[in-house]
Image: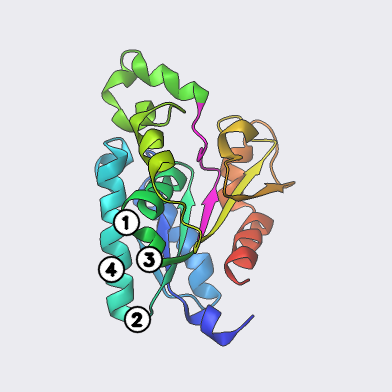
Amino acid sequence: MSQAKNLRPLVVVNGLGAPHFVVRAYGAYFRHHGRKVFVAPQKCLYYGDIRDSAALVAGTVEEALAATGADRVDLVGMSLGGIIGYYYVACLGGADTIASFVSVGGPVNGCPIAYLGLLPPLVFTKAIKQCRPNSEIFREIRSSPDPSNVRLYSIGTKGDAITSRRCWDAPGFEVITSPHGVFPVGHWMLFAHPENLKLVRGLLDR
């Protein structure tokens, strides 16, 4: 891997409802391997509008660019952070600032189970409703210009009981199926298993 690639800063986006220490612990792995890591802040644990969460990512990217002098950063989205990051790349100018975007267990193709978000009490969690394949979020993403200058990767595992392959196999992404995921806890193994962390690092270091 090149030194220039090693020096590119990394922004990490947490998943739905996950406490902040989870994303900080995840980012620590990449910091240990030479990355300057910036963690996007959370508002209401990302249960609110995905657009608002993506705006927080935009602010963190600007912070990373200013702090490091880099012209681009890499971006990793964990679970729902995959959609948040994808929305930023497609709709909020991220195509001009992101070199590589890796969605890890993110339903970047929409998730049918999110239709449960239309039922009480989940109706009050806007982000879940917005994960529906036909939601306004995905209509906005699909009507945006193709971010062809960003390398897009989507990682998932067959052992994921939350995000099936139809959810993370999205057009425009290089799709990688990790063998390191045991049903039904494969979703969380994507963020904790050492080989899955190594897989993400390898994609970023290309």
Q: Which amino acid type is shown beneath numbered disc 2?
A: Thr
Q: Distance between the residues labelled 1 and 3?
A: 14 Å
x and y, in percent, of residue 86 in the image: 43, 49
Q: Give the range drawn in magenta.
A: 100-111
Q: Distance between the residues labelled 4 and 2?
A: 10 Å
* Res. 123 image quadrant: top left
N-terminal of the two: label 1 or label 4? 1
Say what secondary structure mark 3 lies in. helix
Tell me the residue that label 1 is attached to.
57
Tell me the residue that label 2 is attached to.
68
How dense is the environment of label 1, judged by Cα within 10 Å: few (below 14), some, or many (20 and up)? many
Q: Distance between the residues labelled 3 and 4?
A: 11 Å
Q: Front-most of 49 and 41?
A: 49
Instruction: Say which of marks 3 and 2 sits in front.
Output: 3
The residue sitting at 48% across, 72% down in the picture is 31
Quick one: quadrant of the C terminus? Answer: bottom right
Q: Residue 62 carries which label?
A: 4
Q: Which amino acid type is shown beneath numbered disc 1?
A: Val
The residue sitting at 43% across, 26% down in the picture is 134
